[in-house]
Image: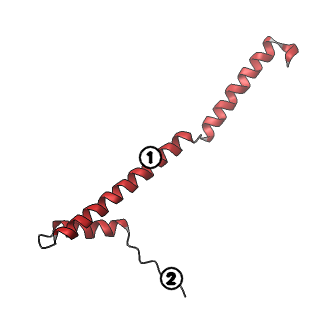
Amino acid sequence: MKTIDMTPSWETITVMCLEVITNPLADREAKDACKQELFRLARTVDQQNAELKAYNEKTTTVGELLAEQAVDEILAEGRERRNPNEA
């Protein structure tokens, strides 16, 4: 049997929660549940952003690798010129 994922998107959840929170007829429990769900979304997004930032700080671009390689080659050539017998 095939399973169908009926999980609503966060955009849909946000719209529903805002409708509940702004509805004067909604009970306090429903409003509190919606607020908690929106805060859960905010924490999840904050965590994902922190993880992405940490990943990006560790990631090296191809340009950075090529620049580092070029510097290494220049330094190696300089050492060879100063000490031709050690090469």
Which of the two labelled residues, at mark 1 and mark 2, occupies the earlier sequence position?
2
How far across and down, in percent of the image, does residue 72 sit? 71, 26
How far across and down, in percent of the image, does residue 3 sit? 50, 82
At x 59%, y 41%, the residue is: 61
Left or right: 24 as drawn, with respect to 47: left
How far across and down, in percent of the image, does residue 23 sit? 15, 70
**Image position of 86 with respect to 48: above or below:** above
At x 47%, y 44%, the residue is: 53
Q: Residue furthest bottom?
A: 1
At x 69%, y 31%, the residue is: 69
At x 79%, y 11%, the residue is: 82
| Amino acid carrying mark 1 in the image | Ala
| Amino acid carrying mark 2 in the image | Thr
**Image position of 76 with respect to 33: above or below:** above
| Numbered label attached to residue 69 | none
Q: CA distance from mark 1 to mark 2?
A: 33 Å
Residue named by callout 2 = 3
Residue named by callout 1 = 50
Left or right: 10 as drawn, with respect to 81: left
Q: Residue furthest front?
A: 29
How far across and down, in percent of the image, does residue 28 sit? 17, 68
